[in-house]
Image (cartoon, rainbow, N blue to C red):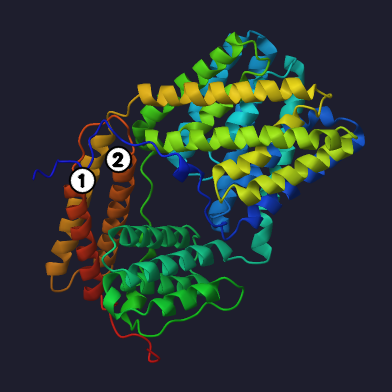
């Protein structure tokens, strides 16, 4: 059989339905973004309520919602990421407000909103900012386009957003005072648990790939802290033990790994595993050689061109169709389309199913809540705060479940300036949801990612080169200090990237045949070489004396 023969026909992929709605377990830090967004949103909104200027909440919400980002990043990296998110949010808000002050032409406003959504999508993907990605940015900028605006008001409104953004940054960084190494501990615990699953099922290729990705992610988290503190070095040793488990699953005790992961969940001292020997000291002393930089931003933007085109086309068409139906808030359709676009068509379809389900149930929830919210502006603010918390607490289980809270919150926000007619709001939201989801998905189908196969080939080549380099060092009697570890880290990154691009390409609906068997063979060879480097470095050694 040819290595290029795919396991399924390239033009006949099944689009999931029930699986898209299946609930998962809650995130281990579900309460952190939920509490953070309440802490970031409440003071500005309550201040505006006290001043009788709740109509300005749209602008403070822009900055406050930045508190949703970067919760998985170490605090040194989080400080930079949140600063960039705030800058990006205020930049998008500025473009929207200036545009709104210059024109009231709805077609022009939708066009600008679609272009902003596409730019926000590819920048969030290229920088790997993580959830909630571009959706919150697109919601704020698109909604702001349809708020009546004078050019002279723009600086003041942007200042409100920036002030709230600074407060959101402070809220996001505040946990560092209590648990300064919390994100790194969680990343290390995730690597240990994933390695335990892989060790318990050594023949499961998916479990091994997931464990390799988790270990790689843990190293990225640790190396992004920029310091060599004792807690970090202790965490590094635990990540090494996870790598040892990948190299020698037969001699690994999965429960020992899970025990270390549980110890990391608290604030106690980091467990210190025995049995690594002196070889680990050399490994832990080559941070400079391991700190691989990201490719330039322009290089990372290139592969995202199909996604950018899908987003721009889908958002624009969704807004235009909404206008044709006479809906007064076409940005809802635009944002619905923007929220769909994932790494491939299959994932985009799943997100569409989740979005429609969540929004329709959310409209029903709004109908229940609106009598309470209309009892006064204080009740309106408190309802929105409760929905903010609920959305972030639930969205980790499935996107549609979080949308049940997001939808009524978005509808209630429109009433900050003045009361709306609930029936009209609900009708417009249902129509825009259906229009945005349908048109957005059709754009994803029409704009095919013709380069997905090329990226798989490039990733295969990269793994081959990294493996040859590592194998060459293994053949040397005495490689230069740090060279083998650097080669191992490079090969690990290449294997993780290969799995990522292969999964993304496999989810495209219409595509050319993928070399799935070759991908599997190259992955397996990469894992074997990684295991060989672990053994050569002397890290594959005895278990603890207690084993």
- Most distant residue in the front direction: 18
Crowding at dot 1, Cα within 10 Å, few <14 / some 14-19 / many 20+, comes out as some
User: Which type of secondary structure does the marked residue at label 1 adopt?
Assistant: helix
Secondary structure beneath dot 2 equals: helix
Whether the residues at callouts 2 and 1 have beta carbons within 8 Å, the answer is yes
Checking the image for residue 218, the label placed there is none
Q: Residue at x 76, y 46 (%)?
A: 386
Between residue 435 and residue 46, name the one nearer to us.
435
- The disc placed on residue 516 is 1
Q: Which quadrant does the C terminus fall into?
A: bottom left
Spatial separation of the CA atoms under disc 2 and disc 1: 9 Å
| Image coords of residue 333 (percent x, y) | 58, 22
For mark 2, does the 10 Å Cα neighbourhood hold few (<14), some (14 to 19), or many (20 or more) residues? many
Residue 50 placement (x, y as % from top left): 91, 38
Q: Is residue 95 left or right of residue 490?
A: right
Asked whether residue 11 is in view, the answer is yes
Image point 88% across, 34% down: which residue?
Answer: 377
Residue 213 higher or lower than 268, as above or below: above
Image quadrant assignment for residue 447:
top left
Which sits in the foreground, 421 or 523?
421
Rendered location of residue 480, percent (x, y): 22, 68
Q: Is residue 385 above or below residue 97?
A: below
- Expressed as whole percent of the image width and height from the top left, the position of residue 95 reads 61, 22
Q: Nearer the viewer, residue 221 or 350?
A: 350
Task: Kindly identify which residue carries mark 2.
Answer: 506
Residue 480 visible in the picture: no
Relative horizontal placement of residue 452, taking residue 338 as reference (left or right): left
User: Residue at 64% of width from left, 42% of height from top?
Assistant: 66
On screen, residue 61 versus residue 212, left or right, reads: right
């Amino acid at each position: 059989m040819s290595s290029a023969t795919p396991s399924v026909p390239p033009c006949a992929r099944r689009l999931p339905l029930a699986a898209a709605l299946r609930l998962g377990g809650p995130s281990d830090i579900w309460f952190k973004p939920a509490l953070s967004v309440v802490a970031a949103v409440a003071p500005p909104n309550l201040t505006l309520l006290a001043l009788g200027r709740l109509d300005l909440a749209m602008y403070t919400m822009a900055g406050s919602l930045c508190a949703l980002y970067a919760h998985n990043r170490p605090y040194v990296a989080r400080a930079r990421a949140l600063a960039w998110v705030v800058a990006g949010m205020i930049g998008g808000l500025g473009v929207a407000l200036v545009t709104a002050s210059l024109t009231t032409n709805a077609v022009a406003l939708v066009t600008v909103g679609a272009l902003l959504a596409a730019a926000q999508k590819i920048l969030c993907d290229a920088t790997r900012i993580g959830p909630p990605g571009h959706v919150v940015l697109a919601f704020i900028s698109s909604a702001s386009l349809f708020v009546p605006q004078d050019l002279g008001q723009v600086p003041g409104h942007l200042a409100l957003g920036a002030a709230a953004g600074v407060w959101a940054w402070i809220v996001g960084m505040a946990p560092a005072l209590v648990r300064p190494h919390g994100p790194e501990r969680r990343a290390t615990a995730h690597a240990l648990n994933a390695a335990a699953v892989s060790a318990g099922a050594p023949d499961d290729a998916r479990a091994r790939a997931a464990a390799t990705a988790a270990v790689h992610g843990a190293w990225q988290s640790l190396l992004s802290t920029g310091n060599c503190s004792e807690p970090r070095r202790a965490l590094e040793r635990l990540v090494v033990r996870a790598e040892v488990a990948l190299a020698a699953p037969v001699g690994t005790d999965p429960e020992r790994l899970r025990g270390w992961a549980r110890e990391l969940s608290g604030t106690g001292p980091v467990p210190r595993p025995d049995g690594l020997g002196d070889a680990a000291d050399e490994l832990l002393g080559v941070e400079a050689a391991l700190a691989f930089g990201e490719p330039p931003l322009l290089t990372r933007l290139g592969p995202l061109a199909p996604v950018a085109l899908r987003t721009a086309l889908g958002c624009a068409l969704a807004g235009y169709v909404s206008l044709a139906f006479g809906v007064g808030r076409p940005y809802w359709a635009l944002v619905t389309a923007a929220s769909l676009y994932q790494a491939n068509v299959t994932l985009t379809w799943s997100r569409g199913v989740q979005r429609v389900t969540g929004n329709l149930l959310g409209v029903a929830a709004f109908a229940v809540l609106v009598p309470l919210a209309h009892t006064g502006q204080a009740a309106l603010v408190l309802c929105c705060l409760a929905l903010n918390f609920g959305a972030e607490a639930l969205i980790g289980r499935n996107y549609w479940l979080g949308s049940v809270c997001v939808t009524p919150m978005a509808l209630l926000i429109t009433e900050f300036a003045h009361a709306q007619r609930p029936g009209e709001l609900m009708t417009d939201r249902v129509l825009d949801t259906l229009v945005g989801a349908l048109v957005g998905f059709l754009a994803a189908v029409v704009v095919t990612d013709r380069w997905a196969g090329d990226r798989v080939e490039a990733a295969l080549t990269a793994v081959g080169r990294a493996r040859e380099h590592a194998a060459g060092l293994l053949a040397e009697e005495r490689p230069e200090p740090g060279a083998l570890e650097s080669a191992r880290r490079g090969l690990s990154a290449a294997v993780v990237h290969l799995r990522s691009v292969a999964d993304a390409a496999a989810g495209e609906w219409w595509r050319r045949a993928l070399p799935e068997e070759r991908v599997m063979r190259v992955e397996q060879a990469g894992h074997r070489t990684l295991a060989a480097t672990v053994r050569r470095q002397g890290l594959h050694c005895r278990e603890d004396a207690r084993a």
